[in-house]
């Protein structure tokens, strides 16, 4: 089967690239003929068959790359199935099956108070996009597109917005990649150094405590300014670990007692990875965090609440939940994702 995977920007990191990579591996293993289509040249060279709309690397203007050329290119008719990733606004004009795998909900990101697009120069940058979004949402609603969501949280919001059925396929997490060492009384956060990850709150919480705290993440382009802002706010017990090797992150997760997450999430791959490493997660009581961490004891509503729960977690008060957390995350394993995608394409071919 000829399959096209569409992602506007390749190589920026995070959940979008994880899903793209696992999709490619799954389809390639099943002997499908896979082409990856991107608006600009990938930031990293990982894939053998990539077509681009623009023949240069364009690591910025991510939102506008999502809406660039919203009409499906005419030559996409040569594919049997098209799978669109990372919220790209592509309208189906091919007559072929098209799936949109969404790790957001085609929504207005300024609805999230943590979004960087709510103030300053970013709000000016976002303003034209807001008008484009309304027009494209109406077109998508009428288009022959099948929706897949990365969580029940995203699926419910999409059903409400578009009135269409939405299938949930959780993002792939390779649970076997992680291991568990004897724990140190230390806290870790894994997130992009970006405003929507709300890392200022994480720093404020951990500045109040004395235990070692590590934030592992990446900062690209404009996010370097955010990284520098955080660096000026940290106390001696806080270390910002920017662009560190993957194996170092895995080792730090393995030895950490607690993983703190402070952002609104549409799934939260990093939290699942932390649980797989034997960490106790402490997360906000909102969004898809409720799916990845389904225990009230481990979710907070205020910063003071978070501090108390982190202290309890460091003292072992929540260790009784560790077996249940491990059982819970099995549904997010990469094997489940592979099964669901294989089944999906099998149904498309009938």
Image: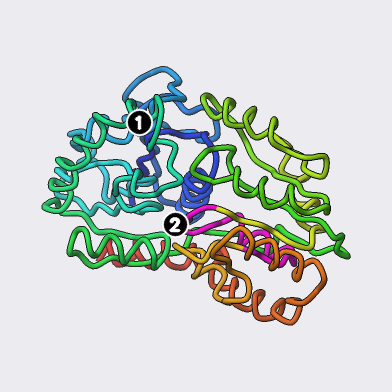
Residue 157 position (above or below residue 95): below
Left or right, residue 94 beside residue 158: left
Please state if 98 lies on the left or on the right of 277 as rendered. Answer: left
Image x and y of residue 23, in percent: 46, 51
Q: Position of residue 156 (x, y in %)?
A: 31, 66
Residue located at (46% from left, 46% from top):
114
**Residues packed near mark 1 inside 10 Å, few (<14), some (14 to 19) or many (20 plus):** some
The residue closer to the viewer here, 97 or 231, is 231
Quarter holding the C terminus is: bottom left
Which residue is tagged 2?
Answer: 266
Q: Is residue 9 magenta?
A: no
Q: Is residue 276 located in the magenta-colored stretch of the structure?
A: yes
Instruction: Please indicate whether residue 48 sits to the left or right of residue 347 in the image.
Output: right
Q: Residues within 10 Å of mark 2 (few under 14, many from 20)?
A: many
> Of all residues shown, which one is farthest toward the top?
56
The residue under label 1 is 123
Q: Secondary structure at mark 2?
A: loop
User: Residues under labels 2 and 1: Cα distance?
Assistant: 22 Å
Please tell me which residue is depicted at 43% across the width and 25% down the height of the picture.
Answer: 60
Q: Earlier in the sequence, mark 2 or mark 1?
A: 1
Name the foreground residue: 106 vs 78: 106
- Which secondary structure lies at badge 1? helix
The disc at residue 74 is: none
Q: Which residues are magenta?
A: 263-282
x and y percent of residue 21 in the render? 52, 46
From the viewer's perspective, is residue 346 above or below residue 318?
above
């Amino acid at each position: 089967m000829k399959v096209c995977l569409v992602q506007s920007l390749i190589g920026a990191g995070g959940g979008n690239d994880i899903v793209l990579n696992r999709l490619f591996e799954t389809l390639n293993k099943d002997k499908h003929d896979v082409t990856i289509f991107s608006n600009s040249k990938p930031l990293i060279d990982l894939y053998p068959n990539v077509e681009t709309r623009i023949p240069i690397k364009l690591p910025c203007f991510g939102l506008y790359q999502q809406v660039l050329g919203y009409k499906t290119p005419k030559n996409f008719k040569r594919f049997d199935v098209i799978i669109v990733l990372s919220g790209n606004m592509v309208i189906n004009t091919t007559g072929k099956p098209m799936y949109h795998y969404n790790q957001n909900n085609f929504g207005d990101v300024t609805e999230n108070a943590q979004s960087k697009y709510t103030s300053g120069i970013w709000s000016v940058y976002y303003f034209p996009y807001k008008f484009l979004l309304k027009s494209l949402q109406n077109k998508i609603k009428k288009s022959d597109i099948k929706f897949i969501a990365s969580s029940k949280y995203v699926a419910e919001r999409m059903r409400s917005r578009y009135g269409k059925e939405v299938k949930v396929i959780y993002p792939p997490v390779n649970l076997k990649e992680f291991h568990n060492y004897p724990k140190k009384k230390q806290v870790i956060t894994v997130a992009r150094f970006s405003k929507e990850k709300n890392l200022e709150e994480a720093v404020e919480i951990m500045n109040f405590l004395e235990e070692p705290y590590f934030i592992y993440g990446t900062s690209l382009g404009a996010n370097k300014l955010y990284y520098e802002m955080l660096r000026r706010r940290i106390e001696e017990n806080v270390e910002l670990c920017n662009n560190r090797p993957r194996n170092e992150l895995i080792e730090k997760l393995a030895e950490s007692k607690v993983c703190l997450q402070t952002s609104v999430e549409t799934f939260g791959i990093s939290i699942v990875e932390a649980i797989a490493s034997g960490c106790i997660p402490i997360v906000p009581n909102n969004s898809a965090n409720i799916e990845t961490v389904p225990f009230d004891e481990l979710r907070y509503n205020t910063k003071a609440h978070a501090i108390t729960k982190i202290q309890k977690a460091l003292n072992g008060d929540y260790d009784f939940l560790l077996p249940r957390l491990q059982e819970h995350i099995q549904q997010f394993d990469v094997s489940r994702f592979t099964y669901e995608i294989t089944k999906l394409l099998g149904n498309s071919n009938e």
